[in-house]
Image (cartoon, helix red, strand yellow):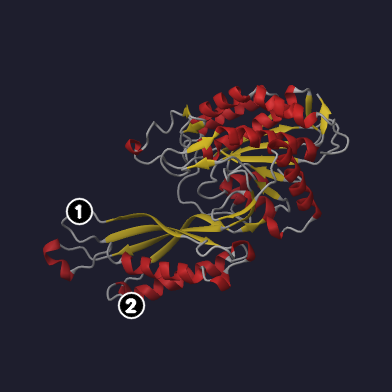
């Protein structure tokens, strides 16, 4: 800990987290009960803004304006309207300004629940069982939002506050573009470091992949199924294109293409056909189809070069098809245009200091050294690390089945992360009396 902090502060902060932990679980249960899928985040953001306002933070709540971010590095294209895309930021203004500023970032949006009959309990009626909280978004990442908030509460309960400005961010759009975090940067929110408690099992994320989303649109020739030979099936025409994309995926994962952080992974980059639609009638040969693709890229891999290869692969495969060569696919980009980010490549003194502070906070809170991990997903960390010269520490609780059925978060892990976060804030920002 920083030398001018009381020697007993770590223990007192941990005790404060324990004392409020039942309230923290209740808060997380309430937040998880809001079905904040894309476009439906308003009720959850209302709840979050009210909780921040009750605690005395300055509230900034605004509708994301695409015109303000479209030109910025890291912007991802969108197809759907941006109605109800609202960010919430709570600001703590330090009186002494003697410490280092901090962004506590988390996303309020969650992925769809899928068929409800495949859940053991309703996804938006969270339940606590055997030390776990179950519910969609409980792990990814409303638990992280709760750890950020209750870490600050622990300081407050001791009559202390961070001795530097802290920006508590509850953003939308993390699950599909990241434009919510980008809008925070555009609005002027910067700091000396950022902490993002995504649910990666109390590991410090050293590197994350980038992600590209795109659609492939195919058009066929409709006819009655009795004369299918004279038509062109736009659904079946997708199959060779998907096969060609998977061959590209295999090439990109070759050992010679892997950066150091991912050298030990045989298949870090995953291509996913996430959705396919097509046709209008069971007894008609489908005249159209659209399939949605998610493809990962390594840190340092150019998005534009990746897109060029994707397009070439699709068009080359189409030209080998008797029908498609005369009706080439259309490729539409929507959603993630996300570069990879490697904290491990940040050699700045600021990054080293932030990592050291989190190392010590985790050790003090858990009695164990902080493990590192490269992850095969993306997070909003890239915006801070790549575009704002801000080391972004991704460190959060253990969760299981995120994006799946029966998503759950380990509550004891959440307790430990909340303690470590409180200790990290005290060290990084310093403390002042309220």
- Relative image position of residue 367 (x, y in whole percent): 70, 39
- Outermost residue toward the left in this view: 226
Q: Earlier in the sequence, mark 2 or mark 1?
A: 1
The picture places residue 323, in percent across and down from the top left corner, at 27, 73
- Which image quadrant: the C terminus? top right
Residue found 23% across the figure and 54% down from its top: 280
Residue 134, given in percent of the width and then of the height, sits at 47, 33
The residues bearing labels 2 and 1 have C-alpha atoms spaced at a distance of 27 Å
Q: Which residue is mark 1?
A: 281
Q: Secondary structure at mark 2?
A: loop
Q: Is residue 421 visible?
A: no
Based on the displayed image, in which of its 4 quarters is residue 301 positioned?
A: bottom right
Q: What crowding class fits label 1: few (fewer than 14 Cα within 10 Å), some (14-19), or many (20 or more)?
A: few
Q: Which residue is rendered at x = 68% and y = 38% of the image?
A: 366
Judging by the rendered image, the residue that carries numbered circle 2 is 320
Provide residue 262's location: percent of width, then percent of height. Answer: 59, 62
Q: Quadrant of the N terminus?
A: top right
Q: Is residue 249 above or below residue 167?
A: below
Q: Residue furthest front?
A: 367
Q: Please name whichever residue, 80 or 410, is drawn nearer the observer in this view of the structure.
A: 410
* Comparing labels 2 and 1, the label whose residue is closer to the camera: 2
Q: Viewer-proximal residue, 360 or 219?
A: 360
Residue at 51% across, 65% down: 266
Q: Nearer the viewer, residue 288 or 31?
A: 31
Q: Is residue 108 left or right of residue 425?
A: left
Q: Which mark is residue 341?
A: none
**Could you tell me if the residues under marks 2 and 1 are in contact, i.e. CB atoms within 8 Å?**
no
Q: Is residue 150 left or right of residue 121?
A: right
């Amino acid at each position: 800990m920083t030398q001018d902090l009381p020697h007993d502060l770590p223990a007192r902060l941990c005790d404060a987290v324990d004392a409020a932990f039942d309230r923290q679980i209740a808060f997380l249960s309430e937040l998880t009960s809001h079905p904040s899928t894309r476009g439906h985040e308003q009720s959850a953001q209302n709840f979050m803004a009210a909780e921040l306002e009750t605690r005395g933070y300055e509230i900034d709540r605004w509708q994301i304006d695409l015109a303000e971010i479209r030109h910025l590095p890291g912007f991802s294209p969108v197809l759907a309207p941006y109605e109800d895309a609202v960010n919430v930021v709570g600001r703590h203004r330090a009186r002494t300004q003697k410490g280092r500023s901090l962004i506590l970032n988390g996303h309020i949006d969650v992925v769809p629940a899928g068929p409800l009959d495949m859940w053991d309990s309703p996804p938006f009626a969270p339940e606590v069982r055997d030390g776990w909280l179950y519910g969609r978004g409980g792990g990814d990442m409303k638990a992280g939002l709760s750890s950020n908030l209750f870490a600050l509460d622990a300081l407050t309960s001791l009559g202390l506050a961070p001795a530097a400005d802290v920006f508590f961010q509850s953003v939308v759009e993390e699950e599909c573009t990241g434009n919510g975090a980008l809008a925070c940067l555009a609005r002027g929110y910067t700091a000396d470091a950022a902490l993002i408690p995504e649910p990666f099992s109390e590991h410090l994320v050293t590197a994350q992949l980038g992600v590209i989303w795109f659609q492939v649109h195919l058009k066929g020739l409709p006819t009655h199924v009795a004369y299918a030979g004279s038509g062109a099936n736009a659904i079946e025409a997708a199959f060779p294109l998907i096969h060609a994309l998977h061959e590209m995926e295999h090439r990109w994962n070759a050992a010679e293409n892997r950066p150091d952080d991912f050298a030990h992974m045989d298949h870090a980059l995953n291509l996913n056909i996430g959705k396919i639609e097509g046709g209008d009638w069971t007894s008609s040969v489908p005249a159209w189809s659209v399939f949605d693709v998610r493809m990962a890229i390594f840190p340092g891999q150019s998005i534009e070069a990746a897109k060029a290869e994707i397009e070439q692969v699709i068009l080359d495969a189409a030209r080998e098809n008797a029908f498609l060569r005369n009706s080439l696919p259309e490729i539409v980009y929507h959603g993630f245009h996300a570069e990879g980010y490697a904290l491990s490549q940040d050699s700045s003194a600021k990054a080293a200091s932030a990592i050291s502070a989190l190392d010590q906070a985790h050790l003090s809170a858990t009695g164990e050294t902080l493990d590192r991990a490269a992850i095969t997903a993306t997070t909003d960390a890239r915006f801070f690390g790549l575009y704002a010269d801000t080391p972004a520490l991704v460190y959060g609780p253990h969760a299981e089945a995120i994006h799946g059925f029966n998503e759950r978060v380990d509550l004891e892990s959440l307790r430990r992360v909340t303690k470590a976060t409180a200790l990290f804030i005290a060290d990084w920002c310093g403390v002042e009396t309220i």
